[in-house]
Amino acid sequence: MIRFKMPSLGADMKDGTLAEWRKQPGDFLQRGDIIADVDTQKGLIEIEVFSEGTLEKLLVQEGEKVPVGTVLALIRPVKGHEKEEEELPVTSVDLHPIEEAKPSELPKSTKERIKISPLARKIAEENHVDITQLKGTGPEGAIVKADIEKAVSKKGKEEAEPIDLKPVPPSVESIRMAVAAAMSRSNREIPHYYLEKRVDMSNTLEWLREANKNRPVQKRLLPLAVYIKAVAKALDEVPDLNAVWDNGLVRKNEINIGFVVSLRSGGIVVPSILQADSKTVDEIMDAINDIIPRARAFRLRSSELSESTFTISSIGEGGADKVYGIIYPPQVGIAGFGGISEQAFAVNGMLGIHPVMDITLAGDHRATDGLIGSRFLGALTKYLQNPENL
Amino acid sequence: MNQEELKNTVFQLLKNIAPETEPSQLMPDESIREALNIDSYDALQFIVALCEKLDIDIPEEDYGKTRSLKSLLEYLSSKVG
């Protein structure tokens, strides 16, 4: 039997609230299916399963807040996959009991007798949907998120003006606290070392200009797509940085690049491009176009938050020249890309004005030394300057 | 489309990208991106939205002309005709 556990969606996550089950006992689950929505400090996250099998039993009720690592459900695996599996890496997260979890305390007022998942209730309230008028399609006729979504879109049509379903975003404070927790832990536990290198970006920008010339505006590439691909290739060459620290260096097989997305309301989220090394620059750009709007709307999937093996932070055009990152635990490195600016720069003994960018690496000195970090920045420079080979 | 309609379209598209800002308060010569705190990704989304809304193409070499409200409106007027 597979014990499906509350995943850790980042070093800062200690617990999550099971907002709604999307599957019921008896349902057959395929890899990548969304089994539940979990409410976290980073918003409502769709939780995927990574193994096939039949959902046997739900062990946690909707509305219950449980620590990371708590078994949420039992899944009967298909034949040949009987080994007990952990669904997602649960990495060195403190498992404190959470006192506010009171699953059995159900309100008893008439209004509350309608069978409805806590998530559906929350969305209904946000969108002013009258739940007494709805027929639920969930287990035992319970109203679930999908029912509210249907009601809202129907309401929108009737009123002849589209109504956007409000996604119930987390508060600014809760995002701030999540960032504070992860960064404090990093600074407390990880002895950082820092390296930097100045890169002539003439070739890269020329390549991007040419690549974008014949593309429709919707398909144009941003430098970020090139940075992500170049980092993935450099990590392939220097695999000790594509790793986590778990009482020792543990290399990761997949190269999943997390990138920092800043939120307009303040704070950041760090979704990741999965298997960035095997994607083309165009595919990475498509993934960026898919992920950034969802990250800002707090509609990410569990794999996009939990599977990063390395992180990058890019300041973007016109911003600061350098950014020195703080490692996102349990990862062992973070690369920083400063803004590109025109500087006096010597190439082959000739001083000229070139667009240059300062790239930095913060490494975990428990896991690697400056020599490895330096090799990584060298490889990264090589790939950035030869984008035609990416 | 007259100058006023063009301006309102620009304000509306900027408001979609940066909802908490007031694009109509922009000074003619200040950098739109800096004033409204728009990052590289959203800057590209703004260009995409302009192209789709006005049915024009803005090639990458012209991005510099979209920097301030004044230069952007001049540029768009020349494109929309």
Image (spheres, rainbow, N blue to C red):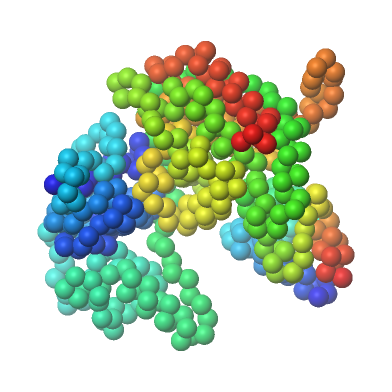
The answer to which quarter of the image holds residue B66 is: bottom right
Q: Name the image quarter holding residue B22.
A: bottom right
Q: Nearer the viewer, residue A252 or A190?
A: A252
Q: Which residue is nearer to you in this view: A273 or A170? A: A273
Which residue is pictured at 63% across the width and 63% down the height? Answer: B15
- Apparent side of residue B14 relative to residue A25 in the rendered image (left or right): right
| Percent x, y of residue B57 | 77, 61
Please determine whether, in this image, residue A339 is positioned above or below residue A70. above
Looking at this view, is A309 or A64 the one in front? A309
- Please indicate whether residue A143 sits to the left or right of residue B23 in the image: left
Q: Position of residue A50 (x, y in %)?
A: 29, 48
Closer to us: A40 or A369: A369
**In the picture provided, is B5 more to the left or to the right than A53?**
right
Locate the N terminus of chain B and report the quarter of the image it occupies.
bottom right
Specify whether residue A320 is in view.
no
Among the 4 quarters of the image, the one containing residue A10: top left
The image quadrant where one finds the C terminus of chain B is bottom right
Which residue is rendered at x = 52% and y = 54% of the image? Answer: A290
**Residue A49 placement (x, y as % from top left):** 29, 51
Residue A167, horizontal then vertical, whole percent: 42, 63
Q: Residue at x 69, y 41 (%)?
A: A317
**Res. A123 in view:** yes
